[in-house]
Amino acid sequence: MKRDVDIAELAARITRLLKRDTYSAALPIELVECGVGHAVLGMTLDAATLNAHGTGHGGAVWTLADMAFGAAGQYDSHILTTGSDLSFLRPAMAGTRLLAEAREIARKGRFGHFQITIRTEGRPASEVVALGRFTGQWVGAHESGNTQAGV
């Protein structure tokens, strides 16, 4: 069962998470939208996010996926990644803006499963760069002090 959450407070929690995580804070990741069990993060591929071939580094793309997963799970409390599977379908070139969308697809108690889609931002059409599933466990309470039990 999904919880009633103030979306503005949720966005503020996610923004604090992105700034507090020292590894991902070094990347140009930003919150685009969020909701209960859903988040979209964006990142433009700059020099710091490229590999030796001039395309998006797999580690940077995976980090974007992981942070989108974490953002989508923030509605309850902090969620830790316990498993992930991300398939890279095509490279993304320097200067490309990527959007990572995470959606909760199942939850049992303190464990959740999320679908991740990373696509290029483009008009008229975007291309899917990577697809995956992340699994995580909610731990502790988020910063508002909420200690809701798992559903």
Image (cartoon, grey):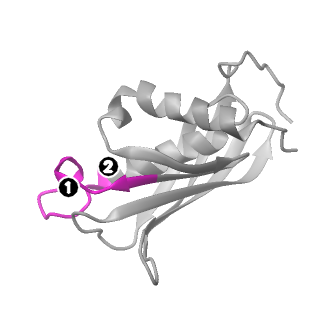
Query: 37 and 95: which one is in front?
Result: 95
Horizontally, is 135 left or right of 48 in the view? right
Query: Which callout, 1 or 2, points at the residue further toward the start of the chain?
Result: 1
Residue 57 is a magenta residue:
yes
Where on the picture, by quarter, is residue 80?
Answer: top right
The residue lying furthest to the top in this view is 145
Residue 93 pos. (x, y %) = 24, 68
Q: What residue span does the magenta drawing correspond to?
A: 42-59
- Tell me which amino acid carries mark 1: Leu
61 above or below 13?
below
Disc marking residue 94: none
Question: Could one spot residue 74 in this view of the protein?
Answer: no
* 91 to the left or right of 122: left
Mark 1 secondary-structure assignment: loop
Residue highlighted by disc 2: 60
Residue occupying image coordinates x 16% and y 52%? 47
Mark 1 neighbour class, 10 Å CA radius: few under 14, some 14 to 19, many 20 or more: many
Which residue does the image show at 77% across and 20% down from the upper left?
Answer: 146
Left/right placement of residue 101 relative to residue 9 reads left
Tally the marks: 2
User: Would you name the residue on which mark 1 appears?
Assistant: 50
Q: CA distance from mark 1 to mark 2?
A: 8 Å
Amino acid type at circle 2 is Ala
Q: Residues within 10 Å of mark 2 (few under 14, many from 20)?
A: many
Residue at the image position 59 percent from the left and 32 percent from the top: 12
Q: Secondary structure at mark 2?
A: helix
Q: Is residue 27 above or below residue 77?
A: below
Residue found at the far left of this picture: 52
